[in-house]
Amino acid sequence: MPITDTTAPEPRVKTGRATKRATNLSLSADVLEAAKRLQINVSQVCDSHLRAVVRQEQERRWRQEHGDFISAYNATIEAEGLPLDQWRSF
């Protein structure tokens, strides 16, 4: 069966109680003030969004690195059929 789902396996990003480290960020003053007024945890939001962006980039790179193999595998299946297909009972 050709590979159609080219999403990467779960990236190895620690979840849960990860070690945190202080860092400096430059944020738009008006957005920062609005977030404070709304009692939004800026650190948590930044961490969550950055985690999502990292995961997305890891998946993109995985697809890029493995794209040739997936294309070759799909071409082989298209040309030769599935391995052991002759013994399939469904």
Image (tube, grey):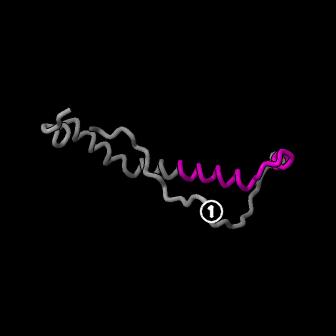
Q: Which residues are magenta?
A: 32-56
Q: What residue do we see at 18% from left, 43% from top?
A: 83
Q: What residue do we see at 57% from left, 58% from top?
A: 15
Q: What residue do we see at 20% from left, 39% from top?
A: 82
Q: Is residue 9 above or below residue 6?
A: below
Q: What residue do we see at 17% from left, 37% from top?
A: 88
Instruction: Find out whether residue 36 is within the magenta segment.
Output: yes
Drawn side of residue 59 relative to residue 37, left or right? left
Drawn side of residue 46 relative to residue 35, left or right? left
Instruction: Find out whether residue 87 is within the magenta segment.
Output: no
In terms of secondary structure, what is the magenta stretch mainly?
helix
Please identify the quadrant where the C terminus is shown. Answer: top left
Give, as a three-letter code, the residue at label 1.
Arg
Where's residue 57, x and y in %?
Answer: 52, 50
Residue lying at the far top of the rendered structure: 90
Drawn side of residue 73 relative to residue 48, left or right? left
Question: Mark 1 — residue?
Answer: 17
Which of these two is toward me, 50 or 87? 87
Where's residue 67, x and y in %?
Answer: 36, 46
